[in-house]
Amino acid sequence: MAKQAWSIDELAELSGFPARTIRYYQTEGLLAPPVLQGRYATYSQDHLDQLRKIMSTGKRGASRSRTEVDSEQAEPLAEAPSPKNDPRGLHMEPLVRCVIAEGIEVIVSPDRSGLDRKQIRTTLEEIATMLQRRSHDEPIKIAPIEPTSPPRPVVPPLAPASPAGTSKLLDILQGAGLTDEQFRRMHPKYGETIKRHLSYVSGIDVFRAGSQNVLVNHRLQVCLYLLRDQAGQALANVDQSLMDRCVEEAARAIPLVA
């Protein structure tokens, strides 16, 4: 059977797993990463089979599933609390913590580093090898550590969601280059388009509290906030890779309505 090339929304529809759960399983190492075709991430029959296996073994929704680095001293990934439940409003992420020498620990973010389990293990082994030179009195050169600013909340103060506000946000983001494919990552309804959503919101006066329309509006607000932070107020000729990152971060920052 020829392999398919599905988007994450299509894979979610076929498997019954929400898209955010699929991304979490990728981060945890339970699901292989997608295949990049140009600017787009695609999924195949192999990914669907893996998700079905997870479901059959009772791992779906498991709160304590982990990715472990194949090392005796590596500790498992920390859980990734939802930003909705984080009182600081910060983006939380799973981390690999490994003690590689007395008094020395290394913490790796698989999500931001883009490293898989094998690459993390290789990196840790290289660091451990470097540290072993101490027993031969070989100096270890450490690059200066630059001070870093404290983490900034990903979710800005959100304005009340309204149909008019959604129309304005979509007008700005479309002008910056937002595509239907990117918009679908922020909309819970499968196959939704910008034009169809604009047509819908233009016919109503208010959003019901807690509805999916409010969720979409808030995701659009976060996306625009991140774009302006990175590209400036003008939002002219926004790079599509930047738009992709802002869309993904907005979808993570505002969780799906239960």
Image (cartoon, rainbow, N blue to C red):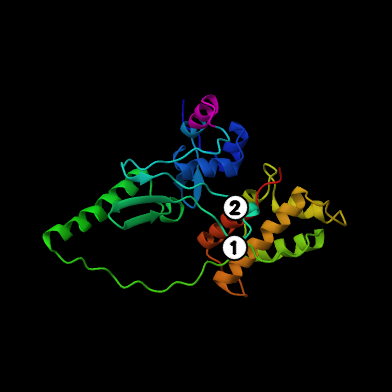
Mark toward the start of the polypeptide (2 vs 1) = 1
* 53 sits left or right of 147 in the view: right
* Residue ranking furthest to the left: 136
Asked whether disc 2 touches disc 1, contact meaning CB atoms under 8 Å apart, the reply is yes
Q: Is residue 230 visible?
A: yes
Question: On the picture, is 65 further left or further right than 87?
Answer: left
Give neighbour class at mark 2: few <14, some 14-19, many 20+ (Cα, 10 Å): some
Q: Residue furthest front?
A: 102
Secondary element at tag 1: loop
Q: What's drawn in magenta, residue-wise?
A: 49-59
Q: Looking at the image, which residue is at 38% across and 73% down?
A: 146
Does the magenta segment cover residue 158? Answer: no
- What residue is disc 2 on? 252
Main structural element of the magenta stretch: helix, strand or loop?
A: helix
Rendering quarter of residue 232: bottom right
Q: CA distance from mark 2 to mark 1?
A: 10 Å
Give, as a three-letter code, the residue at label 2: Arg
- Give the number of marks: 2
From the image, tell me which residue sits under label 1: 154
